Image (spheres, grey):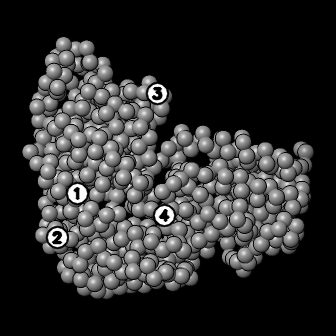
Amino acid sequence: MCAEHVERRLAAILAADVVGYSRLLEANEEDTLNALRSHRRELFDPTVATHGGQIIKVMGDGFLVEFGSVLSAAQCAVEIQRGMLERNIGIPADRLIAFRIGLNLGDIVFDTDDFHGDGINVAVRLQTLAVPGGIACSAPVRHEVGNKLGLDFADQGDKTVKNISRPVHVYFADLGSGASGGQALSVSSGHTQAAFNKPSVAILPFTNISNDPEQEFFSDGITEDIITDLSNVSGLFVLSRNTVYTWKGRNENLQRIARELGVAYVVEGSVRKAGNHVRINAELIEAASDGHVWAARYDRDLTDIFEVQDEIAKAIVEQLRVKLLPEEKKAIEQAPTESVEAYTHYLRGREYYHIASKSNHLMARQSFARALELDPGYARAYVGVAFCDARLRSQFGVEIPVDEILANTERAIAIDPNLAESYAARGFALAVAGNRAEAVRAFELALSLGPDCHEANRYYAEFCVTDGQFELAASYFQRALEIKPADYGAPIMLVNVLRSLGQTERAESYARLAIKKAEEEMRLHPENANVACLGATALAFLGARDRALEWLARSLATDPNDINIQCNAACTYALLGEADRAIDLLEGWMPQVGSEMRLWFKNDSDLDSIRNHPRYLRLTEISD
């Protein structure tokens, strides 16, 4: 038997990974993979080769590179990060690809099948400590580089890292005005610059530990308000609500969550609400060490809820040693309403609105209206009523005067002229009224005020479909999905639009994604009949006939009288080649809906197979 060949050598090791890779794949697998291939082909691999490096391992979103010289490894790392900064110009913050890089000098042990050694382990741990777009290095690397590259280094001191017995002395490279490690990653106009030299934090959804599981909406509202408060602090980089909510209900290691989200700190907590009393636990955790930086428990009367939210936000700011500007302090202290009862009704209304049935929209409207009775100056509650009324009129044919819907959007705008959702609701109402040119202006204003406003992107996308502007619709549906990765409707709508554009392969990719998201939504909300009927159309498109019919039956059994479900059932039957069955449903559906849905009917690619059917042609005469 031959002895196993083992080789050991001292080398500079560069470890790199893509920040939030799983999240990016979930939001848009095809575009993420294409972008990463492009970055590797055009920047990463050529830069490694230029500096004499050798990629010794690729792990999907991670790379290990060996160099014979510490200086070469550092030059390579700097060029990659500066190059990525330029390549990410104009890319929205939640879509861009950013690398974290760790540099170490140490032994690599090569054997027949693999390689290992503390040199590699330390490089990988340094990479996890680096900020997105930045470089973390060990003391030997920092001292070897010295002043040769004109870099400054921020001394982070000794850090205890996983699976390494001794502390590692860590330095962050400050890449200067042209770089990413200590500078902002520029994103498209209208987006806040994600300055990755700032402390980065994710506020995870607070857990509802009340005896009543229906109080979930209240714990969600508290989480979102803390996110909103901290997002107003210029010295922090705070992940959006829609990004962190992809982790709701998932029992994962906090260090893994932080790694996937690309943040240095995580906030988690719980809420127990009982009568007029509330108990909130909150803690701030440093991801690298899994150490608790701060924790607090608040036992208060419910009327103190806004004060507690302010205290939590200010405590996090203080612990992260961030300077709070006077206007930021004022914004944190500004409560959305003076009435805790109005706030509770608003949160309840938002929870109802999540499920797109007629009954849920009516209950949501009732909750928003009750919030307004308690506080007539509550802008977001006016927006909630307007969205409900526009949807009820358009999708369910409820006779609600358009002037009344528009008046509610105007009241919201008068109270808060910078609230993007108000203009999105106005655009929706104007579309329902048939004032399409004004609707476009309202949607565009909403997007200029809030490029990351999910409602503005989603409802404008739907408007574009009714206008036959499929390329625009595709871009806004895709953006809505990126903003809110849990949105099961957006990828299903994308399937529809991409088929209209003749992009069958992309449509199939989004159909598979839509089914995955629909399954998760049905797990969380089994009472949501709308998700099963929408998912049935995606399954039918993919040829999964039995499963499509099973989902459709589940949807109809849950809410058999919902005309929106009947419409989607017609789409499923049309995709499965059952024309008469589809048209039977459409004949019952058509007289009950508003003008916007009739325009959708004309542009819905689910119905392409029955366009020439004589009964369908008679239906188009009715829709005119």
Front label number (1 vs 3): 1
Q: Is residue 350 visible?
A: no
Q: Quadrant of the N terminus?
A: top right
Q: Is residue 497 above or below residue 419?
A: above
Question: Hey, what amino acid is under mark 4?
Answer: Leu
Residue 126: quadrant of the picture: bottom right
Q: Within 10 Å of the Cα at label 2, are there few (<14), some (14-19), or many (20+) other Cα atoms?
A: some
Q: Nearer the viewer, residue 331 or 349?
A: 331
Disc 3 is placed on an element classified as loop
Name which of mark 2 and mark 4 comes first in the sequence.
4
Q: Position of residue 545 (x, y in %)?
A: 32, 26
Residue 36, x across and y down, in percent: 63, 44
Q: Which of marks 2 and 1 precedes in the sequence?
A: 2
Label 3 to label 4: alpha-carbon separation: 33 Å
Task: Decide: is 58 above or below 466.
Answer: below
Which residue position holds label 3?
503
Give the residue at x 81% y 61%: 74
Q: How many marks?
A: 4
Which residue type carries mark 2?
Pro
What residue is disc 2 on? Answer: 376
Q: At 17% across and 53% down in the image, what residue appears?
A: 405
